[in-house]
Image (tube, grey):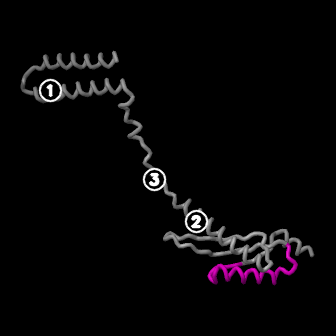
Amino acid sequence: MRQMLFSICAAAVITALYKALIPTERFSAQIKLLISCFFAVTVINAVSGLNAAWDFSDILSADTSYNDYTVQVFGLAEEKTADALRAAIYEKLGEEGIVPEKIYIDVNISDNGSISISDIKLVFGSVTDHAAYAERAVAITKRLAGTGTGVTAELTPQAKKEREDE
């Protein structure tokens, strides 16, 4: 508080001395304006130095960056779509006695928001009659997903190795 009062008093004394020493009245309006501005700036600096509530630097440096969440939303939509289709495929194949080890689904969401399934891969473990088993699984899956979706069936790497060893 003492420093603030000292700054204001010093500015008032300097302002008064300068007014007294003005040589002519010719530029008095401009000099009065300059002295008033000097005094006002000094008072504002003295008061703002005393109280941190006058500090506007955190307001001026506010984070105004734009967060685009469309990638996360599209990713979540792709994941939920694949999960729902995977559950339907597991259920339908299970009714037929076909149990794939894994089902991989490629889901695509375009910029306008339309969802499409481009590819479904059925992965089976060791199956004795893989060809007939895979054909039935592909046919059933195509009926569920539509004819525009590519559906393939393959063996796991371990099952492929077992078949080669036989």
Q: Left or right of 138: which side holds 44? A: left
What residue sits 31% from the left and 26% below the top? 45
Which residue type does callout 3 highlight? Tyr
The numbered mark, 1 or 2, whose residue comes first in the sequence reads 1
Sort mark 1 into few (<14), some (14-19) or many (20+) by Cα contacts within 10 Å.
Answer: some
Q: Quadrant of residue 31?
A: top left
Q: Which mark is residue 66?
A: 3
> Residues under labels 1 and 3: Cα distance?
47 Å
Q: Which residues are magenta?
A: 126-151
**Marks 3 and 2 in Cβ contact (< 8 Å):** no
The x, y position of residue 13, in whole percent, is 21, 16
Give the residue number, with chain letter if any, for mark 2: 77
Q: Which mark is residue 103?
A: none
Q: Which one is closest to the eye, mark 1 or mark 3?
A: 3
- In percent of width and height, residue 127 lies at 85, 76
User: Sequence-wise, which precedes: disc 3 or disc 2?
Assistant: 3
